[in-house]
């Protein structure tokens, strides 16, 4: 019995006894969530030029006598977030696994007003381009939300890295960075399930993708 107790204390002091580490990490994880709030926690952003296009024909007696094409171009600013209250964590060995059920798109999607450009081309007796542009502007929010969700697949890498680094910075500030060597992040909503692993040094918060599973 004495030998077992001594061995357990030695292992705990040398960082290999993980029961208490797991409890500390779990408590620290819950504290981070309560401090940051459980709703929209933005972890990925990117901007890109988008073009919204509409084409409409003007028929007479069922026959097209002209068409109009209008285009609205702008720079959209997409933001993606997780709900911290939905995250789960598990410390296995020297790896902290974090799972997010979903990566959400923040809506309505913001865009740069100075980047907006309008264009209308009328052929023969096509419909009024200004009326079509006005409708396209009204529909822009829905269109950008649709495009933003299509872009989600390219936001996972940034989101995983940001989530790992933010938790690591918090754990480091609270003296828990020695409990793990890497943080692995996954998203259940990702079509091709991927676990992104990031290795952290004890001295500074640098990360390196170790690969996917």
Image (tube, rainbow, N blue to C red):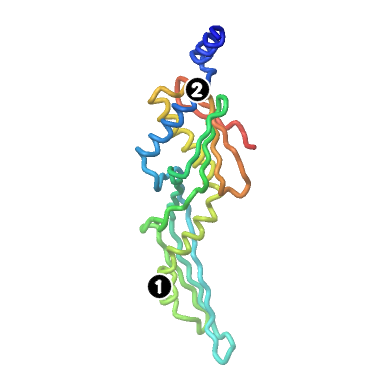
Between tags 2 and 1, which lies in front? 2
Q: Secondary structure at mark 1?
A: helix
Could you tell me residue 69's position as x and y percent? 51, 73
Local packing at callout 1 (Cα closer than 10 Å; few below 14, some 14-19, many 20+) is few
Of the image marks 2 and 1, the number of the one nearer the N terminus: 1
Residue at x 47% of width, y 23% of height: 20
Local packing at callout 2 (Cα closer than 10 Å; few below 14, some 14-19, many 20+) is some
Q: Considering depth in this image, is 42 or 154 the residue closer to the camera?
A: 42
Q: Residue furthest right?
A: 213
Q: Considering depth in this image, is 35 or 184 the residue closer to the camera?
A: 35
Could you tell me residue 155's position as x and y percent? 52, 46
Q: Is residue 141 above or below residue 177?
A: below
Between marks 2 and 1, how big is the CA–CA gap? Answer: 54 Å
Q: Which residue position is annotated with label 2?
A: 201
Residue 185: image tag = none
Could you tell me residue 41's position as x and y percent? 41, 44
Q: Considering depth in this image, is 71 or 202 the residue closer to the camera?
A: 202
Residue 134: image tag = 1
Q: Residue furthest front?
A: 1
Residue at x 38% of width, y 34% of height: 31
Q: Residue furthest left?
A: 35
Q: Secondary structure at mark 2?
A: loop
Residue at x 48% of width, y 67% of height: 71
Q: Is residue 151 above or below residue 88?
A: below
Could you tell me residue 213's position as x and y percent? 64, 37
Quarter of the image with the N terminus is top right
Q: Considering depth in this image, is 158 or 167 the residue closer to the camera?
A: 167
Q: Is residue 101 left or right of residue 107?
A: right
Residue at x 50% of width, y 60% of height: 146
């Amino acid at each position: 019995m004495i030998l077992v107790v001594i061995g357990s204390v030695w292992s705990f002091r040398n960082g290999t006894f993980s029961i208490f580490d797991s409890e500390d990490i779990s408590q620290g994880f819950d504290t981070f969530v309560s401090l940051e709030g459980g709703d929209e926690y933005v972890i990925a952003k990117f901007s890109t030029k988008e073009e919204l296009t509409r084409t409409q024909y003007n028929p007479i007696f069922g026959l097209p006598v002209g068409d109009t094409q209008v285009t609205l171009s702008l720079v959209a600013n997409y933001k993606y977030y997780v709900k911290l209250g939905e995250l789960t964590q598990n410390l296995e060995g020297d790896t902290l696994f974090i799972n997010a059920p979903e990566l959400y798109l923040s809506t309505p999607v913001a865009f740069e007003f100075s980047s907006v450009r309008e264009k209308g081309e009328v052929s023969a007796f096509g419909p009024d381009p200004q009326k079509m542009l006005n409708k396209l502007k009204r529909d822009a929010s829905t269109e950008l939300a649709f495009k933003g969700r299509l872009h989600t697949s390219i936001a996972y890498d940034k989101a995983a890295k940001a989530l790992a680094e933010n938790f690591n910075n918090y754990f480091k500030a609270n003296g828990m960075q020695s409990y793990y060597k890497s943080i692995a992040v996954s998203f259940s909503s990702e079509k091709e399930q991927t676990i992104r692993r990031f290795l952290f040094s004890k001295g500074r918060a640098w990360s390196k993708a170790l690969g996917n599973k």
